Image (cartoon, coloured by chain):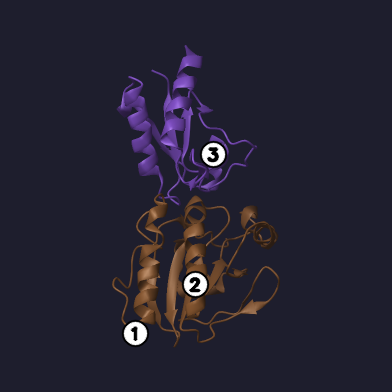
Chain colours: A purple, B brown
Amino acid sequence: MPLVELLWWDGCPSHPEALADLQAALGELGLDPQAVKVVEVANEQEAERHGFIGSPTIRVDGRDVLPPEQDQPAGLTCRVYRLRDGRYSPTPDPQDLRTALARAISERT
Amino acid sequence: MPPINLPDTSGQRHDLDGSPATVIVFTCNHCPYALAWHERIADAARDYADRGVRFLCINPNDGERYPADSYEAMQRRVATEDWPMPYLHDADQSVARAYEAQTTPDLFVADSQGRLAYRGAPDSSHSDPSQNAAWLRAALDALLDGRAPDPAETEPVGCSVKWLA
């Protein structure tokens, strides 16, 4: 089982939805949904230490599964994702998340 | 409701002017919730303009720590989008503090006397465009019909206001 992490900050209310989507995606991929390591990023120092660019951030073995197109500075903020239809969203598109997780896990093996 | 006297992205100042209803929207550039709801709020501004309803968007965030919310970034955004309402800069956050704004977005609706008639979210789901700012529209319809909005308050949902350190 790869190390799957959800990093979050409480200034954004999106992490429960992100965690639910992540667990559902892991289940569909045949992985244990309960194995997600949930990491709260509480302050700017922790954001720097984790290289945290916003909440929620989902990583497999330390790599962002949906990295932004441009480099982002570490900090306490909410990430802006785009859904497949182009709308803004505080959480990744579930289909994009499944695809990215599957790719990250296959690259690992 | 507390007074407002803030500059928009062209430098023109705006205040509460006794319009039949005024919608004050604390919002910003960098928050996905604010972005997700923006078009619904803008559509409501267009739809209610001929009934005398004013919309004032206010960015209260610390633009130093969050450069996407700087005054210059606000100006760039308005220049490249179709905004039917002014976008005001609350540089010292005095207005946001007076309103006790919590999130972006966080909406306040004032009647013609400047009394609070509704406060909260535009509708029940940032992710469902078909909601079409239903709570906000219901509050405006009630106010313009001389009724008290019901509900008069909902829970604002979004990113925390980024207060100055």
What amino acid type is highlighted by mark number 3? Phe
Q: Comparing marks 3 and 1, which lies closer to the viewer? A: 1
**Picture quarter with the N terminus of chain B:** bottom left
Q: Percent position (x, y) of residue A71? A: 64, 37
Residue identified by numbered label 2: B24
Whether labels 1 and 2 share one chain: yes
In the foreground, B83 or A80:
B83
- Sequence order check: which comes first, mark 1 or mark 2? 2
In the foreground, A29 or A8:
A29
Q: Percent position (x, y) of residue A13? A: 40, 50
Q: CA distance from mark 3 to mark 2?
A: 32 Å
Identify the residue at the far left of this view. B150
| Residue located 53% across and 45% down the image | A80
Residue density around tag 2, few if under 14, some if 14–19, many if 20 or more, within 10 Å: many
Report if residue B89 is visible in the image.
no
Task: State which chain disc 1 sits on.
Answer: B
Residue identified by numbered label 1: B146
Which quarter of the picture shows residue B85? bottom right
Q: Percent position (x, y) of residue A29? A: 36, 21
Q: Is residue B151 above or below residue B16?
A: above
Which quarter of the picture shows residue B89? bottom right
| Residue located 47% across and 11% down the image | A109
What amino acid type is highlighted by mark number 1? Gly
What amino acid type is highlighted by mark number 2? Ile
Q: Secondary structure at mark 2?
A: strand
Label 3 with label 2: CB-CB less than 8 Å: no
| Residue located 34% across and 21% down the image | A31
Indicate left or right for B101 with A20 as reference. Answer: right
Q: Secondary structure at mark 3?
A: loop
**Picture quarter with the C terminus of chain B:** bottom right
Residue identified by numbered label 3: A52
